[in-house]
Every structure is written in structure tokens, then in C-alpha cells.
Image (cartoon, helix red, strand yellow):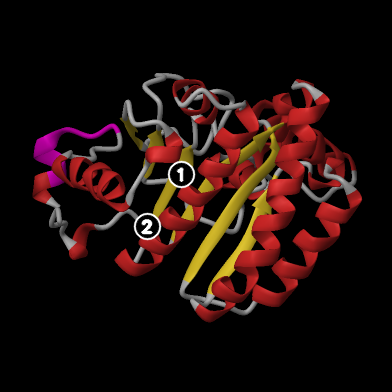
Amino acid sequence: MLKIDQNNLPRHIAIIMDGNGRWAKQHTMGRIRGHKKGAQAVKTTVTACREIGIQCLTLFAFSSENWGRPNEEVNALMSLLADYLDKEAPTLQKQEIMLTTIGDVERLYPSVKKKLLEVKKLTEKNRKMVLNLALSYGSRDEIIFAVKKMISDNREGKLNVDDIDNDTVGSYLYTNNIPDPDLLIRTSGEYRISNFLLWQLAYSELYFTDVLWPDFKKDDLLTAIAVYQSRERRFGLTSEQINDK
């Protein structure tokens, strides 16, 4: 198994889980079967991150644009989410993983939303890792929501325009309680961000792999982390400035 430096782990990994449909097509199956197989990869990846010592894992599970997919597929995705929450809640609790979400969860099916809130409540005191699901999420929507809230707070005298900086904007985003991702992984060979964490990914390391999400294993995760560890993160500075610190 690939060795990684335990002293240089990314605190927060974000993953765009892409390729369920193509995996299904390659295996002459319907798209829903691909999503079911992808759900297994979610379980594998969550467990692997917990074992490695990752503090936070954000999974792009359902985008705001996904509501436009055929009803049959949307229904299946909602059902898979509910099934995952049912089956994995005891494991999350046992492994001391806190479940959080970002996105417009009010749009989720009522039964799914109810189950989601139950699992979030069940795991809210867990501190070993955060599993953050992006559900009904779109980064542009998130930024628009933040801007509107800042304008509202300004009008109410709660926010001075001259005080707005990077930290202020970050505090109005869905992710205000978690650090920005150190590493973004996208599977299936696509090289796009797809309206995901546009503000938060400003200085993240990006890793793209041809592996389809249903085939993503622990070794693939370790490879991505090893590549991350081989890079020099400068945050706009020079190598000399980083090395002098």
C-alpha cells in the first residue's frame, strides 16, 4: 500500500464524485445502478479518510442543477441518500464522525430531510472527523445568498461595508464552520469545478483522475494525497519566502 506522510495530511478534502453514469454504461447497466455502485464508494472513502486521519471530508453529493435530471433519476438519488443515512448512521456514530451539510436542504424530499436532520442531531457531538455532504448545492447560489445576507445586515446596522474582507465573506458562506479544502479530487477524467466551492477553492490543490467514482478505492485516495504532499503550497508567495518561514 502506498505510504503517505502522516505529518503532512490535508485537513480538508473535497471530492466531486463523477462517473456513475459512465460506469453504468461501461457495464451495460442503467444509470441508477451506477449511482448505487457509487454509494458503495462513498462508504469506502469515508472509512478510509477516518482511518488516515483526515479532519474533514466534503462530498459533492447532489447539485442544485441535478434537480433538472429525469424524475426517475432524482427519485432514485433521493432514495439512495435516505438509504445511506439509514444504514450508515450507526457507523458514523461508532467512528465518531459528525455529519454536516451545505446547500439548500429545504428542497430535499420531506422524508429525506427528516432523516438527514435526525442523523445530524445524532452525530452532532462527534469530533473525530466531519463528513460534510453538499446537497442541493450550487456555489453561485451560495455566494448570492451570502451577498444578500450581508446587504440585509448592513441595512440593519449589523455590518459596516468598510469592515468587509475575506474573513467576513467566508463567515456568510455555508462552510463558515469548516476550513477551506486543502485538496480537491475530481474523478472520471473531467477537468471542471462544476459550480462547486468556487470561493473556498481559491488556494486548494486540484487533483484529477480518470478513475470513475464507483471504482474509486482507498489506494486512489492515497495516491491523491501523495500527489498533494509532493506539491509546494505557496498561497501567492515565492518558494524563497515559504522556505524562510
Q: In the rendered image, which residue does mark 2 sit on?
A: 11
Secondary structure, mark 1, is: strand
Query: What residue appears at the point 49 percent right and 57 percent down from the top-left corner?
Result: 43
Residue 240 in the magenta stretch? The answer is: yes
- Measured as percent of width and height from the top left, residue 63 is found at 67, 32
| 140 left or right of 155 in image | left
| 55 left or right of 140 in image | left
The image quadrant that residue 242 belongs to is top left
Q: Is residue 7 above or below residue 93?
A: above
- Measured as percent of width and height from the top left, residue 235 is found at 30, 37
Q: Nearer the viewer, residue 222 or 13?
A: 222
Query: What residue appears at the point 41 percent right and 49 percent down from the top-left corner?
Result: 13
- Measured as percent of width and height from the top left, residue 154 is found at 82, 41
Q: Amino acid at mark 2?
A: Arg
Q: In the rendered image, which residue does mark 1 sit on?
A: 14
Residue 195 in the magenta stretch? The answer is: no
| 75 left or right of 4 in image | right
Q: Amino acid at mark 1?
A: Ala
Point out the stretch of residues depicted in magenta.
236-242
Q: Nearer the viewer, residue 104 or 77?
A: 77
